[in-house]
Image (tube, rainbow, N blue to C red):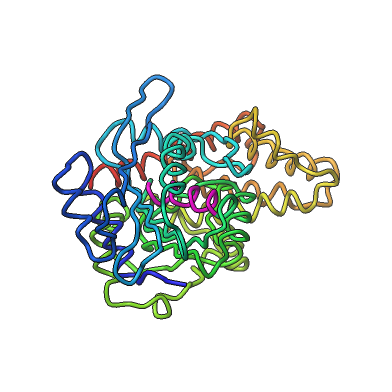
Amino acid sequence: MSQLTPKLSSELAREVYNVIGDELSLRLFLTRSEFSSAPNSSHQLKATVGSRLIKVEDAFGLCAMGGNGFEKDIFIIFRGSTKLTADWLSNARIGVQTSTSGWPVHIGFNTAFKSMLPQIQEFLRGADVGATIHCIGHSLGGAVATIAANWIANNKAQKVKLYTFGAPKPGLMMFANSATRKIRKQNIFRVYHATDPVPMVPLFPYMHAPLPGFGHFVPSSEAIHTAAAHDMEKYAENVKDLTWDLLERRQPPYSVEHAVKSWLESKSNVHAGSWKIWEWINAGIIYVVSKVIGVLAGPIQFGLMGVMTVADTLAYILSKGIDLSKKTGLSDLGRWVFLLMNKIMQALGMGVPDENLEMTHHFLRNVLNRLTTRTNEEAKRVAAAI
């Protein structure tokens, strides 16, 4: 079964940006030896991006039959966000929607994918598919590629491989588990820079595939407030001389439980300018929410996500932990919630909370809403600057 190298997959993810709305550039792109030169062997994909109020149909990627070395393969390549306002309206729609595979995913990414699905289905019906379907994308395109790869793995007999660069989290844990199980961990190549904020959002309960495990972590020194670490050009440059074996899956420090606990309990001040603050906060949320769910006698129903926002649901869980601490006096859940909110509020510039502050569901929800807005603004600003 064929597999793309880091160099080739990053080149395709980078060059697909150049074919948007440009027929000559598209023809030149398709002269690459990896693509078939046969007539009708490619199709440009149009997606509907935006919100309920602003919707735009825009060139979003392409399907192409494989050529030299990839005979019988198919490439499905999605571009990332452009300066088009509607792209970031799609990114900013932080609701949950059931995917075509039956799992909860980001509504904006899913809407973009569903608008292209009939085109993808038509192309696959008419294609002579044999070995592998390669799904590729950067940024927003990486999230859509993940949803597409999971759909293919659930609905087609062909093998699928997924290659993403700097992609945000496309769905909840259930979706990440499904993608890992169906696509298989060894076929998911998720590359992300240490200082790229886009893969850090949306925050928990959104998660990346594969699970368990981590993506291909690439060290980077660019500041989080610049666009440099998210630039597809930077990804292509950093992986061009590597193999997947060299670009190993690495466990970042904020994934280690004792490190997360130590960070939550530390007295050091939190500054949003630190490149890794949002991932530490995300790890803190996962740790504290998991701790609350593990102690509560009754199960937390994530089905509430259908009528509640992510901030509502997380605030509900955290407030239950506080209530349990108050009622029993046997649990330290309230302390962990306080420590978590202390870090979040500092990062948001809200100062250090008073120990006697009443952390009601309403208060927790407001802080978490501000956190969601801030992290998505960070990601939007970085991607829009490219």
Residue extending furthest toward the top: 53
Residue at 17% from the left image edge and 42% from the top image edge: 23
Q: Is residue 309 left or right of residue 323?
A: left
How many marks the image carries: the answer is: 0
Quarter of the image for residue 100 reads: top right
Q: Nearer the viewer, residue 41 or 104?
A: 41
Whole-percent x and y of residue 160?
A: 49, 60
Q: Nearer the viewer, residue 5 or 277?
A: 5
Position above or below: 207 against 300: below
Residue extending furthest toward the bottom: 246
Q: Magenta-highlighted stretch: main secondary structure?
A: helix
Whole-percent x and y of residue 21?
A: 20, 39
Report the magenta residues as a range. 141-152
Residue at 30% from the left image edge and 64% from the top image edge: 67
Residue 329 appearing in the image = yes
Whole-percent x and y of residue 189?
A: 45, 65
Residue at 74% from the left image edge and 39% from the top image edge: 301
Quarter of the image for residue 115 reads: top left
Whole-percent x and y of residue 32?
A: 22, 62
Q: Is residue 356 left or right of residue 3?
A: right
Position above or below: 45 against 13: above
Asked if residue 10 is among those painted magenta in the image, a careful observer would answer no
Q: Is residue 216 left or right of residue 64?
A: right
Residue at 69% from the left image edge and 33% from the top image edge: 304
Q: Nearer the viewer, residue 165 or 292?
A: 165
Residue 375 appearing in the image = no
